[in-house]
Image (tube, rainbow, N blue to C red):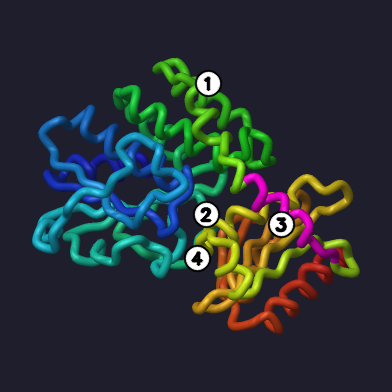
């Protein structure tokens, strides 16, 4: 499959790279990493990235989207990265491209592109792209290495999640050998201002527990507005405050927005993905998400998570 993907990349002069909305380190890292791989090995190609604001990951070099007009897609290849569903793709103009290619490590939800390279054995899309580069003997420059390593670090939880494997470390070693200042990288990733630290502390105090000891947090629209943070910071950013509670194996963050209640589901033991899928979402076995209409539905999801633990 890697060879078919490379053949498709070699076929096009213009390549436009997409990723999911509200990008994390893996989305940005895979996008910039892929752009740099193509530019380094095929310097005559025109390679662009598109998408919404990088927000939390705006410190990542090369993450600023390019100015791409509709007509540039006419004879172009669009590459979609780190995205399992159409509605999650940032910038729907990928449909204007002559052909499309996807690299993803999430559980397959739907067909999107002409050619899909999907492998859930990788902890990150960045890991998948690094393997693509290694198997095709592509030159990896320093920016590509730094970007791809960043995505591997963030999506593996600093190499702590059980998606981390020997394969993960072997590919990370390839990137480290190119030359990465890990001290600088980790400082950018994990240092924070005091106001955000206080916000996380306030969310620790919001944690509640279900009868089966599922940890959960509920944030209303009013609380979201009063926090001064955007919905992504609260929904995706605060789910982690429950990740290290002793005796908790499933946790979920419910955030009410104008679009519904955002649900971020996590586990260190169980496959919670089928429950996310039941409510219209998806993701990984132990890290998934969904959006439900209201808190009543969210409580039904919570009951399903309790039932899951009782069955295992």
Q: What residue is disc 1 on?
A: 183
Give the structural element (helix, strand or loop) at label 3: helix
Q: Which mark is first along the chain, 4 or 3?
A: 4
Instruction: Classify residue 77 as left or right of residue 183.
Output: left
x and y, in percent, of residue 194 in the image? 61, 42
Q: Which mark is first along the chain, 1 or 2?
A: 2
Q: Residue at x 57, y 34 (%)?
A: 191
Q: What residue is disc 4 on?
A: 109
Instruction: Classify residue 153 as left or right of residue 273.
Output: left
Q: What whole-number distance in Å separates the C-alpha atoms at marks 3 and 4?
A: 32 Å
Of tags 2 and 1, the one toward the viewer is 1
Q: What whole-number distance in Å separates the C-alpha atoms at marks 4 and 1?
A: 37 Å
Q: Residue at x 63, y 70 (%)?
A: 223
Q: Please give the range of residues in magenta.
A: 197-209
Which mark is drawn over residue 203? 3
Q: What whole-number distance in Å separates the C-alpha atoms at marks 2 and 3?
A: 28 Å
Residues packed near mark 3 inside 10 Å, few (<14), some (14 to 19) or many (20 plus): some
Of tags 4 and 1, the one toward the viewer is 1
Q: Which mark is first along the chain, 3 or 2?
A: 2
Residues packed near mark 4 inside 10 Å, few (<14), some (14 to 19) or many (20 plus): some
Q: What whole-number distance in Å separates the C-alpha atoms at marks 2 and 1?
A: 29 Å
Of tags 1 and 3, the one toward the viewer is 3
The overriding secondary structure of the stretch rendered in magenta is helix
Contact check, label 2 and label 3, Cβ < 8 Å: no
Answer whether residue 308 is magenta in the image. no
Q: Nearer the viewer, residue 79 or 218?
A: 218
Quarter assignment of residue 263: bottom right
Q: Quadrant of the N terminus?
A: top left
Q: Please determine whether, in this image, residue 265 is positioned above or below residue 9.
A: below
Contact check, label 2 and label 1, Cβ < 8 Å: no
Q: What residue is disc 2 on?
A: 106
């Amino acid at each position: 499959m890697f060879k078919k993907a490379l053949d498709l990349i070699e076929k096009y002069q213009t390549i436009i790279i997409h990723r999911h909305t509200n990008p994390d380190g893996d989305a940005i890292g895979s996008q910039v990493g892929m752009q740099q791989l193509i530019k380094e090995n095929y310097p005559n190609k025109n390679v662009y990235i598109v998408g919404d604001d990088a927000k939390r990951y705006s410190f990542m070099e090369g993450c600023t989207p390019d100015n791409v007009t509709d007509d540039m897609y006419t004879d172009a290849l669009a590459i979609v990265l780190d995205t399992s569903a159409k509605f999650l793709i940032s910038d729907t103009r990928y449909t204007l491209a002559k052909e499309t290619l996807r690299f993803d490590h999430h559980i397959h939800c739907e067909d999107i592109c002409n050619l899909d390279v999907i492998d859930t054995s990788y902890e990150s899309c960045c890991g998948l792209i690094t393997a693509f580069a290694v198997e095709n003997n592509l030159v990896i420059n320093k920016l590509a290495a730094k970007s791809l390593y960043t995505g591997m670090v963030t999506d593996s939880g600093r190499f702590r999640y059980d998606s981390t494997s020997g394969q993960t470390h072997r590919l990370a070693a390839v990137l480290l050998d190119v030359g990465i200042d890990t001290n600088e990288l980790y400082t950018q990733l994990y240092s924070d201002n005091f106001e955000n630290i206080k916000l996380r502390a306030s969310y620790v105090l919001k944690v509640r527990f279900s009868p089966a000891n599922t940890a959960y947090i509920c944030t209303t629209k009013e609380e979201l507005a009063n926090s001064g943070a955007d919905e992504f910071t609260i929904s995706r950013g605060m789910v982690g405050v429950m990740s290290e509670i002793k005796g908790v194996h499933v946790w979920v963050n419910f955030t009410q927005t104008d679009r519904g209640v955002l649900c971020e589901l996590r586990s260190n033991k169980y496959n919670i993905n089928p429950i996310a899928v039941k409510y219209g979402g998806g993701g990984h076995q132990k890290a998934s998400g969904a959006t439900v209409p209201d808190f009543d539905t969210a409580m039904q999801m919570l009951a399903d998570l309790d039932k899951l633990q009782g069955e295992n």
